[in-house]
Amino acid sequence: MHEGGSRRHRSQPQVRDAMIDNPYYGPAAQGAFKLYDLGNLILESGETLRGAKLAYRTFGTLNAEKSNAVLVTTWFSGTGKVMEDVYVGSGHALDPERYFIVIVDQLGGGVSSSPQNMPAPQAMAKFPRLSIGDDVQAQHRMVTDLFGIRRLALAVGGSMGGQQVYEWAVRYPEMVERAAPIAATARISLHQQVFVESLKEAITSDPRWNDGWYASGLDVRNGMDRMARIVAVLGWSPQFYQQQRWRSVLGMASLDDFINGVMKAYFEPMDPNVLLAEMHKWQRADVSRHAAGDLAKALGCISARTMIMPISHDQFFPVHECEADCALVRDARIRTIQSPEGHMGLNGFEPGYMEQVDRYLNELLES
Amino acid sequence: MHEGGSRRHRSQPQVRDAMIDNPYYGPAAQGAFKLYDLGNLILESGETLRGAKLAYRTFGTLNAEKSNAVLVTTWFSGTGKVMEDVYVGSGHALDPERYFIVIVDQLGGGVSSSPQNMPAPQAMAKFPRLSIGDDVQAQHRMVTDLFGIRRLALAVGGSMGGQQVYEWAVRYPEMVERAAPIAATARISLHQQVFVESLKEAITSDPRWNDGWYASGLDVRNGMDRMARIVAVLGWSPQFYQQQRWRSVLGMASLDDFINGVMKAYFEPMDPNVLLAEMHKWQRADVSRHAAGDLAKALGCISARTMIMPISHDQFFPVHECEADCALVRDARIRTIQSPEGHMGLNGFEPGYMEQVDRYLNELLES
C-alpha cells in the first residue's frame, strides 16, 4: 500500500500535465450536461476505461410506465449540443412534451470520458481504443441503472450516432421498440475505411501532433486544417459545390471563405486525439461481429420497427448501401431525406431537412 | 558576353544538382518516344519555358491529304505509354492501319519538359506554373510545324487529357473535326478544386518535400503515400469497394493489399513535383476563360462533332456535370461508359471498358 501510494504521488505531475483544459468541451460551449459515473468500464478490447463518465442531458419527463424514453446518440465531431439544438424541441418529432429524451455523448467525443479529459495513465495518446459496442454497453448501463428504463420507445442518431442505433437494435433487441439510423449503415464500408484512414493520416502526419502528446490542440492546426479539407471533399456533395450552396445555405462569400470559415473553423477548437478516438470507432463499426461476420444474421436479430433514413446526396453512407441494409431488417422501411448538402445535411442547415426528419420520425413513432 | 558566360559557368553545379535522373520517365519504363524541341515557349502566365520539349510517339501513316490525323492526350500521372498500351492498336477504334495517331505527353508530366528534367533555373520547385492552354499551344505548334497537319480528324483524351481536348475544340475550332473528351469536363468543378488541393497538401506537408528541393522522389514517400490513399477515396467508386473488385479486376487479396500494392505502388516511382505541376493545371482547367468566364459562350465556339463520354461511376467528373457541358456544345452527343471502377476505369482494367470506348469512338469517327 505504501509503495502504491508513493507511486501515485510521484505520478501526480504527469497527471496534471496530461489533461488539457479545452473550453470547447466544457459547459460554456456545450451547454448544460450531466456526467454519469460508470466506474470501471471493461472495453471490448479487454482494456478497462477507469472511472469512465458518460455525458448526457435529458428533456421531458419519464412517464410512470417508463414507455416514452427516447435515446439520442451523437456523431463524429458532434456533441449532445447539436442534437439538442437541431433535433429536439417543441414542434419536432422529438418533443419533450411527449417523450423523455436522453441525449448521450459518445465516449471519446470530448465531453464524455475522452483523451483530453482523462487522467494518466489513460490520457492523450494512451486513451484506450474504443468501439461502438463500448458506447452501447455504457449507454445501456446508464439507461437501465440510472433511469430504470427497460424499453426504449426509440433509439435515433445520425452517422456514427446511427452506427450506435444499429448496435443497440442488434444487441438489445428486446429493449429497442423503434430504431431510426439516419445517414448510417450497419457495417462500415471498405470505401469509408479508406476515407477515414486518410483523415487520420492528415492529423498524425503533422509533426506537432507528436504521437498524441501536444500541449494544446491548436498546435496541430496544420494537420487539422488538412483533415478539414478532406472532410469537405466527401462530406458535401458535388451538387453542393456546383450550386455554390455555401452562399445560400451558409452565407459564405466564396469557396475559400467556405473552406476557411466553415470547415477549418468548425474543427479548430476541437481536440485532435478526440477526433482520432472517434475515427477509430467509426472505421470499425460493424454489427456483423455479433454473428461471426454474417451481416444478414446480425440484422436478422433486430425486432425493432426500423426506419432507415439515408440522405439523398450522402457520399459517406450512400443510399444504395442503406437500401442493402434495409433488405436485411425484418420490419424496416426506408425513407430517403432529400438534401443536396450530402452527409453534412445532418446539421440541419438546409431549410427542408428537419421537416423531413420530423415527418419520418413521426411516421415511425405513430406506428 | 564574357560576364554572361561566366555566370553560366558558375551556375553549372546547380544545374547538375537540380535535375533528377528518375528512370521512371525514361525509355526503359515509358517505351520509345521522341522529343520535339519547342524552343522557348511563352506561357499563359507570361513566364517562358526555355528549351521546352514535347514528348510524342506516332503510329500509322499520315495520308497524302493529311486528313487522318488523331491526337491523343494524357491524364494526371499517366504518360503516352498507357495511352499506347490501352487505347491504340489493331482492333481498337484508334487503329494505326487507318489513322496517323500522335500521342503527346503533357508538359510537366515527367516525359515532356518537367520539373525533374528541366535544367536550372527552372528545375524542381522553380519549374513554371503551367496551364492546359500551354499544353494545347505547344501541341498545336508541334502538330502544324512538325507534321504540317491543318485539321485533326479527332482529338481524344481522358481526364486531364479530356480537359486538353476541350481546350483544343474551343481554341482551334477550325482544326478539330471531331472531339472526344472522356471522363472530363470543360471547366473544373469547385468540388474538384477542393479535392485536388487535398492531394497537393498531402505531398507538400511532408517535411521531406522540402519546398520541392529533394534529392530523390523517394524521399517524399510518406506524403506520396498519403496522396495515393486520398486518390483512392474518390478515384474508385463506392461500388468498386463494396464489391471488392480489386479481387476480380486487379487480382489483389485484400483492401490493404490493394492500397499498398496498387495505389501506393503506382505512384511510388513518380516525381512529386511532376504530380504537383500537373495538379496545378488540373485544378484550373477552364475553357470559359476564353470568353470572360462565360462557359456557354466558350463551348458555343466548338464546331467539332463532339462525343462526350463520362464514366458511369466517376466521382471526379460526375455524369451530371458532363451532361451540363453537353447541353452547351452545338454538335454534341453523350455516351456514358458503364464502369463500376469509377474514374480509374480509364486505365482499362475492366474487361468491358475498351469495348465501349471503341464502339463510341467508331460511332464518332464514322460520322
Image (cartoon, coloured by chain):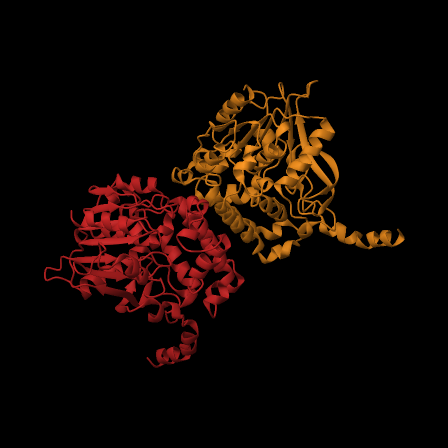
Chain colours: A red, B orange
Q: Is residue A253 left or right of residue A58?
A: right
Above or below, comparing residue B46 to residue B327 in the picture: below
| Residue at point 63%, 57% (across, down) | B210
* Quadrant of res B213: bottom right
Residue in the foreground of this view, choosing between A119 and A92: A92
Q: Is residue A189 left or right of residue B288?
A: left
Asked if residue A349 is positioned above or below residue B308 in the image, the reply reads below
Instruction: Tell me where residue B339 appears, x and y as whole percent.
Output: 45, 32
Residue A83 appears in the figure: yes
Q: How many marks?
A: 0
Q: Position of residue A43 (x, y in %)?
A: 31, 60
Task: Give the residue at the far right of this rendering.
Answer: B2
Image quarter of the N terminus of chain A: bottom left
Please state which of residues A132 and A75 is positioned toward the viewer in this rendering.
A75
Residue B278 picture quarter? top right
Residue A170 visible in image: no
Residue that appears at 45% across and 30% down: B336
The image quadrant of residue A144 is: bottom left
In this rendering, position of residue B353 left or right of residue A324? right
Give residue A120's position: percent from left, percent from top.
39, 71
Nearer the observer, B115 or B332: B332
Q: In the visual, does B306 lie left or right of A133?
A: right
User: Horizontal and vertical percent for residue A126?
Assistant: 41, 65
Q: Is residue A304 above or below residue A268?
A: above
